[in-house]
Image (cartoon, rainbow, N blue to C red):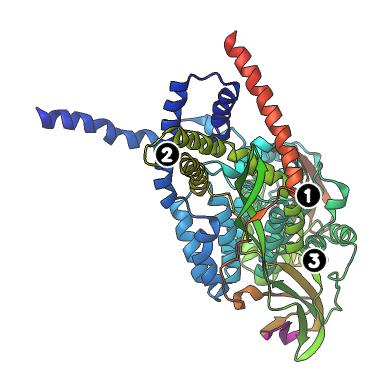
Amino acid sequence: MPAAWAASRVERHRAAGSWPRAARRSCARGVTAIVLLLACAAGCATPTWEQRIAPAQRAYYGGDPQHAAEIIAARLEDEAGGPDAHVLRLELASALAAADDFAGSAREYVALDDQLEVLDYSDMPVFELAAFLFSVNRTEYGASRPERLALNTLNLLNFLALGDWEGAAVEARRLRVLMLQGDLPEDRRYASALAWQLAGVALQLAGRSGEAEDCFRAAGSSDLAVDPPPDEGTVLVVVQNGKAPMRVEAIYRLLFDNGLHRLQVPALVWRPSPWQRAVVLLDGQPVAEAPVLLDLGAQLRAQYDRDFPRMLAAAAFAAAPRVVAGQAVEREVSERKSKHIDDDLQQVLAQFSGFFTEELLADALPADTRCWSLLPADVRALRLHVPAGTHDIAVDLIGPERKRLHWSVSVQPRGFALVNAITALDEGWQPSQEPRTQDLTHQPAGLAALNMLQAALAVRAAILHDDHDHDDH
Amino acid sequence: MRPTVLALALIPLLVLPACFGPSYSRGSEDHEIDEPALSTRLDRVDLEMALAEWTFGLDGSPFVKTLGERKPSIAILHIANDSSEHIGGALDTLLNSAETRLVQSGQWNVVDNSTLSADAIIAERLRDLGDDVDDATIAALGKEFGIEYFINGRIGDTAEKSGDLRRVQYYLFLRVTEVATKLIRYQASIDITKQVED
């Protein structure tokens, strides 16, 4: 049973004023004892996702993806079958691909593909979302839709790197099934030009030209649909640029139930890239700038903004037991009159105790900030047709800083080669900045959250009323 | 007295891990473990049913009846994966099982697929083989390996997803082609449907 439900019963009895004074005092003492226990637990509370993944990120962004993969694999071994296994495998697959172990990465993605579910907050009831995001026992990781599509897109790149066109074509078809999913609105089906275009490239290489044309048509562009003359081949240059925004815990305040209460909500923070442009060079000569075909950061941001009021309402719903506990402790302290303390000081102490109780309980239950943190912020791609032979391919990364990446590529007549640049490996690691604490009570997201909270509480009250009637009978 | 009580108290603790460890079963003792579908990929039951249907059709076809006592040479080239599932391993197994059935039927001289794959040029050609086999490959099969008939095919699917439901409808096409005339002598399509609901 979620903690929110357990506490809701306590709250309802209190509101009805049906408890005798002695019972209330006894309950308050019990709550105080629990709070003390939780205060101890807070000291050793579960670390947040950003704390847990930091060692692997430090290795990955420091340019040692192999070491990052080893760190994640060791953690996965300890936590096999645990609630974080899926997200750890996503991180592991990213690290393996960056370490050029495309077969190992593909194995992880394929194994995960059947198990990883999309978690859609938009149609999830607030109380269910509260249990999902703020429960003591973490639930199995569910991916956001952009993450779910990224799995097949990045795995398609793995198969292209391995020269396995049939495997790449399978990933292309899996992407197509996901993108044309029956219950998805029409405008979101064609949102990923990269996924459609890469699917087209994979199917073209696998000799399925009809299917490939369908994909390029769906992409609304055939920039990557290069068909070289017999004595030439093609090089697909993919630049995975920057770091996708990451979820970290943020503290917000919201006025409800006669008080300004602390809410812990996953916030999405940008991790700026030092490079904004990627220019591709062939044998020392600039060819063109690789266009952004997938703005993963913007997609994650849009989804987060859409979900934020609902997450806030869920956080407020999950905070209800803490509010009850804080009020119980405050009442207990205010009723214990001491000869040595005057009434005003006693009241201040009581309020402080109540506030402190809520803060301690909140600390013991951090918000679920799990996310696929090794994703790039955006993906750019350019396909060149080149004479058969060996070529020098370079990518100039341009921004406040400049950097040039080099590859030597050998291409057969009508052959294909993939250059997969991951700029984050050269960006270094910095801890994500937590957003500052804000009172959202009068902001649009806060108002929307309060409306949702009211509706959720009304539903809960109705359910409890039904349960109570049922018990009476 | 006390050590005995302590020992008795410890016995359940020793037994407990055995109760919660993984449990293993053997297919030869429990036939039901092969039955349930665990994913939308192809499992042994699917492959055996598909192969049984195909060989039944081939054995009863007018084409095989015209062969009489003669044992022509045959090879299975490739079954292309045009589906949305990573079933390359299952298709290799299907190819090997089909070879076994052809050998056991006693009607064919079977040229092992791995013999063909040992030839680098043929292996490269077979790797990207779809529905059509080009003339140069057909000529090489006849000249270099003495093959009179070859089997090739592909598996496609219609995959759909809605909410928590994913359904894959497979269509397996297998055909026998005569090398000398390039005519298709036998062709069959086998349907397999798998579904998973989260």
As helix, strand or loop, the secondary structure at mark 3 comes to helix
From the viewer's perspective, is A380 left or right of A321?
A: right
- Residue A465, compared with residue A176, is above or below; it is above
Q: Quadrant of the N terminus of chain A?
A: top right
- Residue B119, compared with residue A176, is above or below; it is below
Please check the rendered image and state whether residue A21 is part of the magenta-colored stretch, yes or no: no
Residues tagged by mark 3 and mark 2 found on one chain of the structure: no
As helix, strand or loop, the secondary structure at mark 2 comes to loop
**Residue picked out by circle 1:** A444
Q: Quadrant of residue B65?
A: top right
**Residue picked out by circle 3:** A201
| Place of residue A448 in the rendered image (x, y in percent of width and height, measured from the top left) | 76, 44
Q: Residue at x 19, y 28 (%)?
A: B8
Q: Residue at x 77, y 79 (%)?
A: A277
Residues tagged by mark 3 and mark 1 found on one chain of the structure: yes
Q: Residue at x 55, y 18 (%)?
A: A18
**Residue picked out by circle 2:** B22
Q: Quadrant of the C terminus of chain A?
A: top right
- Magenta segment's dominant SS is strand
Residue stretch in magenta: A389-404
Looking at the image, is mark 1 or mark 2 nearer the viewer?
1
